[in-house]
Amino acid sequence: MLNDETRRKLRILNVGEFIEELEIQQQDPQTLALPFDDRFQLLTDSVYQRKYNEKVRRLIKNAKFRLPKADIHDILYIDKRPLNRGIIADLASCRFVDDCRSIVFQGYPSSGKTFLGCAMAKEACRNQHKTRYIRLPDLLEEYAEKSLLPGGKNKVLNKYAAFKVLVLDEWLMPELSKADVEFLLELTERRFDSTSTIFCTLYKREDWVKRLRSGTYAESMCAVTTTW
């Protein structure tokens, strides 16, 4: 049994879970009969799994998904909604995150774009990537409000540039002002080649330039948005 001083040191090291897992082992005669190396391996595996689960739960909570129960295992493959199982499985592996590429889920209203975006982003959380979901109208509103404060613009840019995976829902749905486009271009530039963005949108890629008020800003943004 662990003495109080050892317990105190384990908690200082932030591995207090070892205490609980060891107490569980103490109640199992079969585990106690194992060699020390085997017991220690089981102990380490249990603590690692517990810490991993806690981190994933925290990442999912902080992502603020619109559909927190969305999951790749619940994706419906039906004739009216043709989805390529191979592509979905590849995306679910989160290789697109490792490659710093982005995804576009485009389709009609109520076709499941938000569900797919949240489901893929949840897989990113399970791969321990810092993730965030936000509707474009809400992002623009936040930027407009924070822009009135000293240094507010840069704080918003830094905040959303830092997420390894960012889900932008209702992409290009609102009418954009020149200031909106400038903000989105700067955000896109900061995220380019180091993060991944999941766009959920009604609009096809060929319509993006027009929705972004055309011009060099729009073309530049589409050029740096490398998608899967």
Image: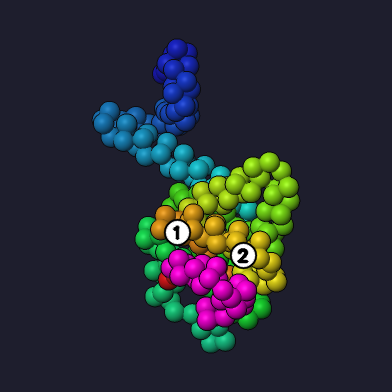
Range drawn in magenta: 202-226
Q: Which x, y percent locates residue 191?
A: 48, 56
Q: Earlier in the sequence, mark 2 or mark 1?
A: 2
Q: Which x, y percent locates residue 140?
A: 68, 59
In the image, 150 versus 10, the foreground residue is: 150
The residue positioned 42% from the left and 71% from the top of the image is 228
Q: Which x, y percent locates residue 147?
A: 69, 49
Amino acid of disc 2? Val
Q: Which mark is residue 64?
A: none
Q: Mark 2 touching mark 1, by CB under 8 A?
A: no
Q: Is residue 128 magenta?
A: no
Amino acid of disc 1? Phe
The residue positioned 49% from the left and 80% from the top of the image is 83
Which residue is under mark 1?
Answer: 192
Residue 93 vertical placement versus 56 (above, below): below
Q: Which x, y percent locates residue 101?
A: 42, 64
- Callout 2 secondary element: helix
Q: Could you tell me what secondary structure mostly forms the magenta stretch?
A: helix
Question: Does residue 127 appear in this view?
Answer: yes
Q: CA distance from mark 2 to mark 1?
A: 16 Å
Relative horizontal placement of residue 52, taking residue 134 as reference (left or right)? left
- Callout 1 secondary element: loop
Residue 150 vertical placement versus 147 (above, below): above
User: Where, quadrant-wise, is the N terminus in this rendering?
Assistant: top left
Which residue is under mark 2?
Answer: 181
Question: Does residue 119 appear in this view?
Answer: no
